[in-house]
Amino acid sequence: MEMFDIKDAIELLSEKKISSVELTKNCLEKISSIDQKLGSMLYVDGKKALEDAKASDERRKSQSVLSDIDGIPVTLKDMILTKDMPTTASSRILEGYIPPYDATVVLKLKQAGAVILGKTNQDEFAMGGSNENSSYKPCFNPWDLTRTPGGSSGGSAASVSAEMCFSSLGTDTGGSIRQPAAYCGAVGLKPTYGRVSRFGIIAFASSLDQVGPISKSVTGTAAILSHISGFDINDSTSRNCSVPVFHKELSRNLKGKKIGVPEEYFCDGIDVAVKKSIFSIIDLLKKSGCEIENISLPHTKYAVPTYYIIATAEASSNLSRYDGIRFGPRVGDEKSLLELYERTRGELFGKEVKRRIALGTHVLSAGYYDAYYLRAQKVRRLFANDFKAAFSKVDLIISPTAPTTAFRIGEKIDDPIAMYLNDVYTISANLAGLPAISVPIGFDEANLPIGAQLTGRPFHEQEILNCAFHIEGELNLNLSPASLKS
Ligand code: GLN
């Protein structure tokens, strides 16, 4: 069966031209035929998925559908708690852990009737940008199996790109939804901080984390966002404000929209093909009636160091709960508590996670707190001010999602700084709490996808979705990776 977009699937389901069981079977067949070479799934429950699909088809027959996405098969990043499936964050320290409850986003998807196929591969505790920090297995880019799918939601983006599901939920602390979406030729959206509940999402850096959708199309991404958004009494950081039905309100009309181009984003380190591609989109937007304005985000050069101080500080605190007692397996003699802690954490956390805990503990320690953590928090305010000034002049900001297309597996793994620098375009939106989307805009000479990032004002997801929708409609790219067709 040729795979199609959620939009078509929704239509076909509602016209009863296809069943959820057929869609689900098709996804499961793809997973079993392709995923051995791709490595995007950590856990699949085909039996349960088919039961849920059957129940969805029954609801359709009896005219009691739960929502327009009732019966649509999706996957979930392994940072998202699922009460009937293991949730490991790709870490040995949570191996075999089955949470006692579902995350709010999972409940919402279930209440909407979506069919959950399984859990996706990722960097351990979402720390990384290539999926190479997974403790279980590598994940490969469906466009070129020698390259990374990006990270940390690499398995989510790869599962969408390889058409093993219609959408996947990822998490984004510094770019982990947008960057893998860009590398895999998919659409990925990080919502405004507070738009989507994080109750039941494994915490990495709580002041930055958000959960959001990755799909093949803007409509698919918008549809899932509509269903997972909203206030949650269980998440004190979720905002009580109205939620548009994003996918029903999509509009391609951009006339008079002001688009900002940050001058700091187009200097050293950016790939020629990426730069060229972004400028051709800027041209396209101009021709479509947008006003293009050069803007400045003067503190951009501090984004990477600021992020890596705040994120590691929060991670060191959040990860202190993994002690071998409360969750998952333990290593060591139970007669010595200290040894139990040391061995469990020493043997079951991976290298990058330990690096971050060490860094984060250092920047929070007495004597260094003011110099690093407090200073970083002050610089963070400057980013918010930069964006506030920019958004007094423009409606949205365009930039590359990442400086290059997907890099080769192994290329940056021994050089953490090079890996961290890759986040330069994505982390500002997290530091300032803004919504941002990555949309495919073309390919480089090696036929690897390129993504453009659109950043908007707080709670203006509709605005960035509309612009992405326009770009998608104008370009009409073929986003099916040929390598997986055979
Ligand atoms: N690459 C970034 C990091 O390693 C972002 C990760 C994320 O967004 N979860 O921290």
Image (spheres, grey):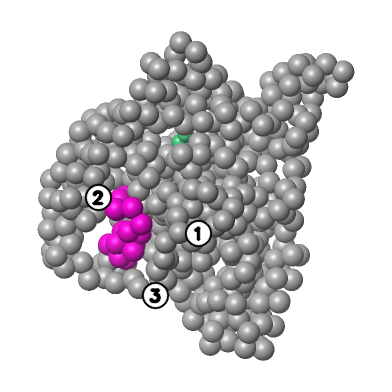
Res 30 visible: no
Question: According to the image, label 2 marks what residue?
Answer: 398
Q: Earlier in the sequence, mark 3 or mark 2?
A: 3
Is 143 magenta? The answer is no
10 Å crowding of disc 2: few (<14), some (14-19), many (20+): many
User: Do the residues bearing badges 1 and 3 touch, measured as CB atoms within 8 Å?
Assistant: no
Label 1 sits on what residue type? Phe
Residue at screen point 21% across, 50% down: 391
10 Å crowding of disc 3: few (<14), some (14-19), many (20+): few
Residue at screen point 63% across, 62% down: 107
Hey, which quadrant is residue 49 in on the image? bottom right
Q: Which mark is residue 209?
A: none
In this view, the residue farthest toward the top is 367
Question: According to the image, label 1 marks what residue?
Answer: 231
Picture coordinates of residue 137 (x, y %)?
A: 64, 39
Instruction: Say whether residue 486 is left or right of residue 42.
Output: left
Question: According to the image, label 3 marks what residue?
Answer: 248
Q: Earlier in the sequence, mark 1 or mark 3?
A: 1
Hey, which quadrant is residue 419 in on the image? top left
10 Å crowding of disc 1: few (<14), some (14-19), many (20+): some
Q: How many marks?
A: 3
Q: Nearer the viewer, residue 30 or 437?
A: 437
Q: Nearer the viewer, residue 359 or 9?
A: 359
Picture coordinates of residue 459 (x, y %)?
A: 36, 57
Residue at screen point 51% across, 15% down: 365
Q: Earlier in the sequence, mark 1 or mark 2?
A: 1
State which region is magenta: 451-469
